[in-house]
Image (cartoon, rainbow, N blue to C red):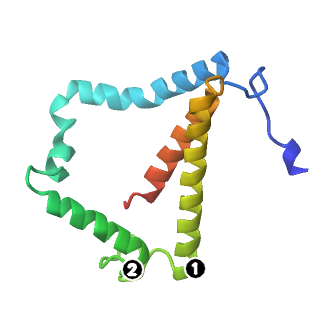
């Protein structure tokens, strides 16, 4: 019963994005981002303020590596010492959830690699590259510590 609930708005059976759907997406994107773009256009100094505050300085690669290890530790090993995002010193994932997360992440990367290999041999399948890019972006943003 649930397999019949999806609605396909494109006339081309989902083989590639239709121009109408693409134009609706671009219009929504412009409407949503325009206030922020206008703000940064009027106050260009604010565009790089936060990046300058938290961005890496030359020669601080050890701090970047330490931050990455700390973020991964927060997910699986030691937890975060502050109570902002979770219970203090409690990991985000318990051992069972962590193993399932890593299993799903590795499965995703293997499937993404297979799609890229297919893409090299089959140029007509343009939609799969969009799927891979969206999956990788979702994986990147979901795995980033807040």
| Circles 2, 1 touching at the beta carbon (< 8 Å) | no
Q: Residues within 10 Å of mark 2 (few under 14, many from 20)?
A: some
Residue underneath mark 1: 96
Q: Which sits earlier in the primary sequence, circle 2 or circle 1?
A: 2
Residue 13 point in image, percent of width and height: 79, 26
Observer-nearest residue: 102 or 56? 102
Residue at the image point whose x is 15% and y is 33% from the top: 45
* Residue 127, disc: none
Secondary structure of the residue carrying numbered label 1: helix
Q: Residue furthest front?
A: 121
User: Could one spot residue 84 in this view of the protein?
Assistant: no
The quadrant in which residue 144 appears is bottom left
Q: Residues within 10 Å of mark 1 (few under 14, many from 20)?
A: few
Secondary structure of the residue carrying numbered label 2: loop
Please indicate whether residue 17 sits to the left or right of residue 113 in the image: right
User: Could one spot residue 93 in this view of the protein?
Assistant: yes
Residue underneath mark 2: 77
Q: Residue furthest left?
A: 59
The quadrant in which residue 73 appears is bottom left
Observer-nearest residue: 90 or 101? 101
Please indicate whether residue 63 sits to the left or right of residue 97 in the image: left
Question: Does 59 appear above or below 125?
Answer: below
Q: Residue furthest right?
A: 1
Residue 69 point in image, percent of width and height: 30, 68
Please indicate whether residue 141 sits to the left or right of residue 113 in the image: left
Residue 117 point in image, percent of width and height: 57, 39
Observer-nearest residue: 42 or 98? 98
Residue at the image point whose x is 53% and y is 27% from the top: 28
């Amino acid at each position: 019963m649930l397999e019949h609930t999806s609605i396909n708005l494109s006339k081309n059976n989902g083989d590639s994005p239709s121009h109408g759907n693409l134009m609706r997406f671009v219009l929504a994107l412009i409407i949503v981002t325009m206030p922020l773009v206008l703000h940064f256009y009027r106050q260009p100094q604010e565009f790089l303020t936060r990046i300058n505050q938290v961005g890496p300085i030359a020669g601080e690669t050890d701090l970047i590596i330490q931050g990455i290890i700390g973020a991964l530790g927060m997910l699986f090993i030691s937890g975060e010492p502050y109570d902002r995002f979770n219970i203090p010193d409690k990991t985000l994932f318990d051992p069972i959830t962590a193993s399932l997360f890593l299993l799903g992440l590795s499965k995703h990367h293997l499937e993404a690699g297979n799609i890229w290999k297919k893409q090299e041999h089959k140029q007509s399948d343009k939609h799969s590259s969009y799927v891979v890019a969206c999956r990788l972006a979702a994986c990147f943003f979901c795995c980033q510590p807040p």
